Amino acid sequence: MSRKAATIALTALAPISWGSTYFVTTEFLPPDRPLFTGLMRALPAGLVLLALTRKLPSGAWWWKAAVLGALNIGAFFPLLFLAAYRLPGGVAAVVGSVGPLFVVGLAALLLGDKPTVRSMLTAIAAAFGVSLVVLKAGAAFDTVGVVAGLLSSLSMSAGTVLTKRWGRPEGVGALALTGWQLASGGLILLPVALLVEGAPPALTGTHLAGYAYLAFGNTAISYFLWFRGIERLSASSVTLLGPLSPITAAVIGWAALGQALGPVQLIGMTVAFGATLFGQLNPVPKRAKETKVVATAAPVSGSFSSAEKNDQEVSMDLDGRAVRR
């Protein structure tokens, strides 16, 4: 397996894990506590990662970590849960599936990545496939819920693109950066959860087990893999892995909750999964291919000229990892 394929596979584990959130929430957690659930997902995981890495932000990274934590966690979780409570699950998932379209636009503004017909069509196909999987006939639309869903998707998309733009400071690993964002996002959620929902509910062993899974498997590890993927892949490539989340949720619902999967849902899964795979393809531009041919023609032994060395390095870069264009 190539390095890029391995990175894609590991990054894909994040949305696959997030697809289990609905099942865990409904089967293991106390009802009607979305903000407390978001808090329990983010803050304990962030504090544990801070303790493990023993790294705190410095300089401009104090406000950068706060911005990323707000976009990816602190604002995203409440908006997501508001949409989930105001809309049927299928409608909420479809509204959230427009994320790849937001990322294409934001990447053009903030990263200088020009949107292509291919990237737009792939994002639209992914959203269409998700709609076939989860959208039911006669589903109700609530204006507040739809706006919250769109804002949650925009928040996560902006966080994804800014994570790509800012990278991480020298000497700081992806695990520490994940801890910064989870901790800052959790601290943003703390007063909101207390003001809106009041004191925490009484927790049973089942509740604690559910929260432990959400905090560490579903959040700490998953967000680490997600941010690591953003660092090594293009922003659009990463966000097109998002449809794996509703696909996973549908499969878990079928396997564990006895929910039906008809022909339309299976077709939608195929379309969404196909768009996800297609979105990972990164065709080499014509000029880059020509450069690669020149590099291959370089002498195998003996000394290289400066230009020949540069050509060979470009060839290795194209073979070894995604190139930012």
Image (spheres, rainbow, N blue to C red):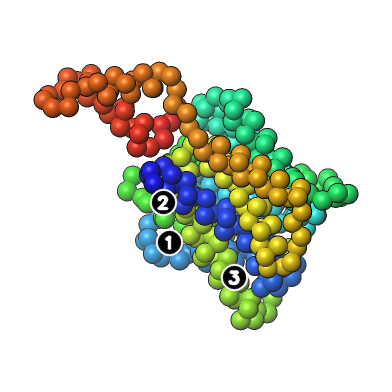
**Measured Cα–Cα span from mark 3 to mark 1:** 19 Å
At horizontal 52% and vertical 64% (from top left) the residue drawn is 217
Is residue 195 shown to the viewer in this render? Answer: no
SS of the residue under disc 1? helix
Residue type pointed to by label 2: Ala
Q: Is residue 277 left or right of residue 302?
A: right
At horizontal 70% and vertical 43% (from top left) the residue drawn is 129
**Measured Cα–Cα span from mark 3 to mark 2:** 23 Å
Circle on res. 167 = none
Circle on res. 174 = 2
Residue type pointed to by label 3: Tyr
Residue 314 image offset from top left, x and y in percent: 31, 27
Whether residue 287 is situated above or below residue 135 in the rendered picture: above
Is residue 111 shown to the viewer in this render? Answer: yes
Residue 25 image offset from top left, x and y in percent: 67, 67
Circle on res. 50 = 1
Residue type pointed to by label 1: Leu
Residue 160 image offset from top left, x and y in percent: 54, 42
Q: What residue does disc 3 label?
A: 211
- Of labels 3 and 2, earlier in sequence is 2
Looking at the image, the residue that sits furthest to the left is 302
SS of the residue under disc 2? helix
- Of labels 3 and 1, earlier in sequence is 1
Q: Nearer the viewer, residue 315 or 169?
A: 315
At horizontal 59% and vertical 30% (from top left) the residue drawn is 119
Whether residue 183 is situated above or below residue 298 in the rendered picture: below
Q: Nearer the viewer, residue 219 or 90?
A: 90
